[in-house]
Amino acid sequence: MAYGDKTGHFEHLKLPMTWAVMGVVALVCVVAALLFLGDRREEVDSSGYANRAGFDTVAGFPDKVLAYPVHKIGDGTNWFDDYFFAIRENRKLKMKVAELTQYRDLYIEEKDINTRYERLLNLRTEPPVETVTARSVAVSRGPFANNRLIDAGSNKKISFGNPVITDQGLVGRVVGVSPDVSRVLMVTDVTSHVPVMILRSDARAMMSGDGGGYPKLDFVRGKDSVKVGDQILSSGDGGVFPRGLPVGEAVKGVDNVWRVRLYSNRSAIDFVKVLLFKDFSQLPNADTILRAPPVSDVLPPPALPAVQSASSSATATSSSAAASSATTVKPVIGATTSAAATSVVAKPKPKPVIPKPAATASSSAAASRPAASSAAAPVTPELKPYVPPSTPAADPSGQN
Amino acid sequence: MKMPGMLGPRKRPFGGTVINRGVRASMASKVITPWDWILAPALMSVALTIVLATAFQPFGFYLPEPVSPFILAFAWPLIRPSYIAPFVLGGLGFFLDFFWGAPLGFWTFSLVLVYGVLALARTYLIGQEWIVLFGLFLLTEFIFFSLCVLLTFIDTGAVARLWGVVEQAFATTLMFPFVLILLEKYLHSDVRFM
């Protein structure tokens, strides 16, 4: 309705404009706050980004269009570089080939030895991981979120959690997948935590992103476990990343905190490789595990107590064996039939601990027993006349 | 729509509709629709965000990543209170949440809160010199990014790198001239809102 053209039924109705707008603001704020509280990112899982797959598919298209000329210009620039600096580069490459040939021979030799060792030791080596190459089309690099969109998705078998690397080192992992576009959570994101190890000392640490280019090393233990320049690799702990991916070098920040200079920042992140690595925690189905029957239903019942074998041996053997077992199991002392002995021994009734009778033991033992029982006597509050412990043993029925 | 006192609406190639009162065109007032001062700048902001997110590193440097909707969150309440603007700002916030991979509601809440505070204090802020406005812009920006850091801490338990926050705030500050352009176009000139 035009300004000043109030001909409707509500022409005299005047709302306090500012307060009405504030009501709208409050409504939007409440909705946003509820969404924020319901979308916690401290545990990055596949369901957290599932509702963004459609948006990423749509957003990926203009980014692909915009990235196309950029990639073309970049490729053209590289072509010009290659053309005009071919001679210089050729000289460099010849020197490099001569140097690397020695390393290649050494590598072949060492690999052969390593393979033989693995066979000898019967080591279970990790299977080779399939990879998918993709190109980065959009990047979010602010302090609050570090993500990338790459132009490959579930159509190329990419799934949630797959690690992403460049030719230099680790970049991040896939946290959202749509058919043609995937979202990669960079290792520099504030929600990213990567278990790493220091190659020199084999110490473990957790690399936590903070939105900057130098993620922190948390939980570093041990003296001199980290030194400046130490190579940092993924440790494989937790199973999200495979072990041994190059991550970066250790540096000490101005805040005296150990940080990682990422190898992936050595050059622009353009082409990336997605490792179709299956996290071992993804292999078993959690629902199946929870629905699994208890162990007691699956495993055979536990073996009978050792008492049974003792009693059966006692009945099978002569009376001398029965006498030898009399110190442990009293009821079978006088048993003569195996049936009676088994029925008694199978379910032994709990009975109070009573000092062993002196009649079944040697005379030296009998001499030491009263002293032991007299040591326990102060438990009774009243002083009573001394009663020899052999008295209850005289009546065998009193033991049951 | 024909209004009283009008000889008839006439479309300009650029800008809004001109009220023809039979006077010279330069003296006539323009009627501003929500498209002019809300939707069109919002779309420009979206386009700028998408363009600056291109994976392109000229000379090894990343492109800047300003929070361009913050310019609108600052300028819109100063131009005039509107029922549409908070919703559009919320939509822009959702766009940033999805596009930048932030938690849902993160940018929405921060931007709309800035809008609300400035809408409340509007009568004290309009008509000031540009330098006063710039100081106010910096103050608002400081509060805005502090809120973002706080929300990130609540969400992840980690404090975002403050130097990175300063970098993003600086990139946003470079867009302050757009605030002046919007105010000059829709607040200080003789315009009428539809």
Image (cartoon, rainbow, N blue to C red):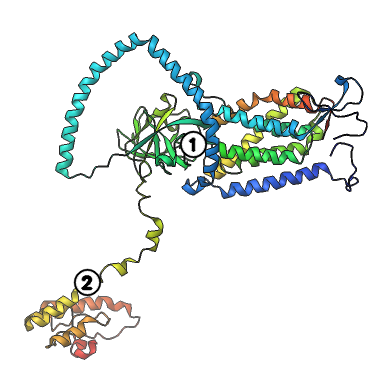
- Residue A303 is situated, as x and y percent measured from the top left of the image, at 22, 71
Query: Which residue corresponds to mark 2?
Result: A303
Compared with residue B16, is residue A32 higher up or lower down, i.e. above or below?
Answer: below
Q: Quadrant of residue A241?
A: top left
Say whether residue A251 is visible.
no
Q: Quadrant of residue B88?
A: top right
- Residue A97 is situated, as x and y percent measured from the top left of the image, at 25, 17
Say whether residue A344 is visible.
yes
In this view, the residue in front, A53 or A257, is: A53
Tell me what residue is drawn at x 66 percent, y 35 percent. Answer: B143
Q: Residues within 10 Å of mark 1 (few under 14, many from 20)?
A: many
Among numbered discs 2 and 1, the one appearing first in the sequence: 1
The secondary structure type at the circle numbered 2 is: loop
Query: Which residue corresponds to mark 1?
Result: A189
Cα gap from disc 2 to disc 1, whole angstroms? 54 Å
- Residue A102 is situated, as x and y percent measured from the top left of the image, at 20, 21
Using residue A312 as the reference point, say whether residue B65 is left or right of it. Answer: right
**Quadrant location, the N terminus of chain A:** top right
Which amino acid type is marked by label 1? Asp
* Chain designation of label 1: A
Using residue A381 as the reference point, say whether residue A95 is left or right of it. Answer: left
